[in-house]
């Protein structure tokens, strides 16, 4: 090792081969070796011994709405990436909608990158968008390095990002399949949503009835049929309905190229606990009942659900009214996602290795980031240092999100992130941040 190199040592390092005491050697931002715990530190190398805290790979969150530019008052690259870093996330992929302009052309992608370039505390990649009228833009966006394309099968909530009907879904998916791309889908069927009772008002039960499970189930069945017909690669976003799990399992068994994510709020919050008027819990599809949650956890355990991401979708506080019909639908979760999932996972008998697989290894694999998602030689030296048994009570004032509205306020969570490292540099420790160190990522050809 040469001067300036680094060794991180812990009694608990989560590696692809399991958790063990180890010393992790880093040079020029890359992991060069995972050594025995008591390996000699070479002359000139700096040792960081984190003791019994767990060293895990930085999380990779592939579902984040940064909203910058255009709706920066909702969120922004500076605040979103600080919140992510505080929660042990070292890479995020930004969704193409809720910013103005949306990321639906190469020019719009350039605009987004220009805004993000000097504000990102962590690494940032970008999704493109698939709209009814932009099939011609999909291949150029792919060649410009987006990781795939987001589509809605029902109204998105913003006028500049319309949804695809089944004919337009088929056209977009055929084009994406022609160059080996990935389509990621908000799967709710508009006809089932339209037929559901629309009461409005402060009662969460009324809102839940307005977004029924069969809207998800039908849309997912239609997506599976299209993917099978075209041999296309598709990904179901933010699965909420456990009723869709048998469809997904059967499709995977048939060889349909489908992956599925769910979110911390579906795994840790339940409909039974949502107070009336508390629209900080509103998201689409909605948080469902505890029995539904149990089945989502089973599907994570058996691999039917591949990964866990935040779907961080913030807004200004004034848009979170006490009327569930009109309040903005989105939950802010970047800073709390690791702790929220770990708190529930440990109660259900899962280990941190499982959490790493769901929130880092598989998310990195989803978007082809082969330098992320694991502590092994050749990967980026991205780490989170976690005290898994320590607890904290969520104080909204302590969050780094631009708007500190949270469904987790007052909850006691396990897992305190002591520090976060990006390519061998500590970017936050005990609430103290360095200057932005993030890079803008593109899809590997």
Image (spheres, rainbow, N blue to C red):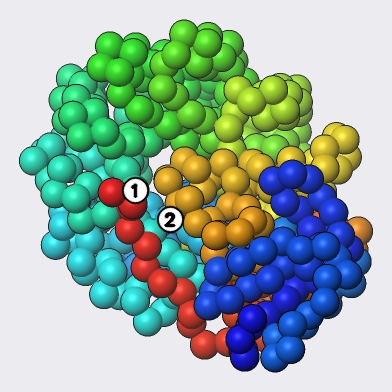
Spatial CA span between label 1 and label 2: 8 Å
State the residue at coordinates (68%, 71%). 25
Task: From this view, report whether residue 149 is shown above or below residue 223.
Answer: below
Q: Residue at x 27, y 67 (%)?
A: 112
Identity of the residue drawn at 12% across and 45% down = 137
Relative to 209, say whether 128 is above or below: below
Q: Secondary structure at mark 1?
A: loop
Q: Which mark is residue 93?
A: 2
User: Which of disc 2 and disc 1 is earlier in sequence?
Assistant: 2
Q: Residues within 10 Å of mark 2 (few under 14, many from 20)?
A: many
Residue 268 vs residue 252: left or right? right
**Do tag 1 and tag 2 residues touch (Cβ < 8 Å)?**
yes
Up/down of 228 relative to 37, above or below: above
Mark 2 residue element? strand
Residue 244 quadrant: top right
> What residue is shown with label 1?
147
From the top left corner, tell me how far across and down residue 105 is, in percent. 16, 53
């Amino acid at each position: 090792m040469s001067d300036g190199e680094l060794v991180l040592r812990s009694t608990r390092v989560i590696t692809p081969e399991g958790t063990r005491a180890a010393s992790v050697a880093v040079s020029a931002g890359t992991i060069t070796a995972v050594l025995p715990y008591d390996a000699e530190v070479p002359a000139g190398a700096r040792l960081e011994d984190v003791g019994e805290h767990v060293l895990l790979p930085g999380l990779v969150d592939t579902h984040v709405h940064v909203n910058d530019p255009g709706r920066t008052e909702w969120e922004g690259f500076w605040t979103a990436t600080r919140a992510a870093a505080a929660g042990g996330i070292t890479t995020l992929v930004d969704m193409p909608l809720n910013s103005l302009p949306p990321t639906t052309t190469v020019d719009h992608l350039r605009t987004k990158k220009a805004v993000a370039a000097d504000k990102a505390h962590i690494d940032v990649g970008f999704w493109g968008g698939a709209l009814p009228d932009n099939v011609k833009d999909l291949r150029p966006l792919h060649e410009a390095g987006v990781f795939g394309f987001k589509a809605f099968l029902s109204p998105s909530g913003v006028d500049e990002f319309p949804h695809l009907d089944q004919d337009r879904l088929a056209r977009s998916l055929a084009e994406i399949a022609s160059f080996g791309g990935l389509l990621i889908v908000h799967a709710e069927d508009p006809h089932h949503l339209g037929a559901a009772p629309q009461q409005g008002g402060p009662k969460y039960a009324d809102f839940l009835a307005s977004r029924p499970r069969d809207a998800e189930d039908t849309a997912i069945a239609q997506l599976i049929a299209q993917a099978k017909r075209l041999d296309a690669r598709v990904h179901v976003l933010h699965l909420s309905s456990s009723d869709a799990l048998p469809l997904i399992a059967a499709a995977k068994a048939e060889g349909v190229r489908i992956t599925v994510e769910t979110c911390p709020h579906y795994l840790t919050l339940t409909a039974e606990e949502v107070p009336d008027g508390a629209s900080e819990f509103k998201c689409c599809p909605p948080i469902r009942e505890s029995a539904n949650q149990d089945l989502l956890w089973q599907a994570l355990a058996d691999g039917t659900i591949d990964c866990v991401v935040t779907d961080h979708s913030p807004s200004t506080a004034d848009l979170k009214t006490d009327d569930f019909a009109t309040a903005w639908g989105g939950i802010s979760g970047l800073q709390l996602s690791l702790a929220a999932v770990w708190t529930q996972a440990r109660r259900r008998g899962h280990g941190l290795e499982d959490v790493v697989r769901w929130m880092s290894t598989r998310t990195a694999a989803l978007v082809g980031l082969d330098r992320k998602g694991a502590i092994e030689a050749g990967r980026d030296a991205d780490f989170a240092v976690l005290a898994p048994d320590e607890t904290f009570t969520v104080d909204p004032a302590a969050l780094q999100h631009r708007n500190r509205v949270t469904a987790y306020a007052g909850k006691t969570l396990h897992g305190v992130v002591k520090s976060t490292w990006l390519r061998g540099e500590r970017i936050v420790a005990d609430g103290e941040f360095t200057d932005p160190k993030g890079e803008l990522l593109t899809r590997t050809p």
